[in-house]
Image (cartoon, rainbow, N blue to C red):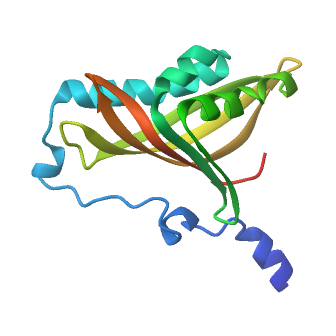
Amino acid sequence: MTSQVKDKALHPNPAWAAQIGHSTLELVTATALEGDVMDRLLIIERVGRYGWCFDERNFELMRDCFTADGVWEGSVMGETNIGPFAGREEVAKWMSGFWPQQFDQRRHMFTNVIIDDLTQSSATVHAYLLLAKTADRKLDMVTTGPYRFLMEKELGVWRISRLSAGFDAPF
């Protein structure tokens, strides 16, 4: 096998997100799993709402997902950085800017959701993205990747204060 073929087989490098510090999970201890079950459910719901509002092109719901000073940033395979975009208005404007150019139906699916560092007012959430698209009656995978959400509780509502999106392939 030539080195060029070998390099392509490892692109992206396995565990790239952990290697660059994008995805760092804590060890599970009894205290790590403590916390209000309702908070955990509402945090997971916020992650789902983020995907739904993008896919259904709802600008107001996109804005509502983020804190006023919320940040969205991304990394493609740990090699190409996107953003950061700061402030809920700028994030929502940037995200909705894709809609006029996307003629397919996108579906953001988040799996393997893990909540770390849960306090009464903040949490770190890790989840895998499966991004699919449907066009001309054909379903295709677009990309996958690790997402990290830093969450803050504002007046009883969980919102994203920083979203670090990871993508395993360009799209």
Q: Residue at x 59, y 49 (%)?
A: 73
Q: Dividing the image into 4 quarters, which one contains the C terminus?
A: top right
Is any part of residue 163 visible from this angle?
A: yes
Nearer to me, 136 or 101: 101
Nearer to me, 163 or 114: 163
Q: Residue at x 60, y 29 (%)?
A: 89
Q: Dividing the image into 4 quarters, which one contains the N terminus?
A: bottom right
| Horizontal arrangement in the rendering, residue 16 relative to residue 46 (left or right) | right
Q: Quadrant of residue 109?
A: top right
Q: Position of residue 160 (x, y in %)?
A: 43, 35
Q: Position of residue 161 (x, y in %)?
A: 43, 40
| Horizontal arrangement in the rendering, residue 135 relative to residue 148 (left or right) | right
Nearer to me, 121 or 77: 121
Q: Residue at x 77, y 76 (%)?
A: 7
Q: Residue at x 47, y 44 (%)?
A: 162
Count the marks.
Answer: 0
Instruction: Give above or below for 40 relative to 81.
Output: above
Q: Position of residue 140 (x, y in %)?
A: 77, 33
Q: Quadrant of residue 56?
A: top right
Is any part of residue 1 visible from this angle?
A: no
Q: Quadrant of residue 152?
A: top left
Q: Position of residue 61 (x, y in %)?
A: 54, 17
| Horizontal arrangement in the rendering, residue 168 relative to residue 117 (left or right) | right
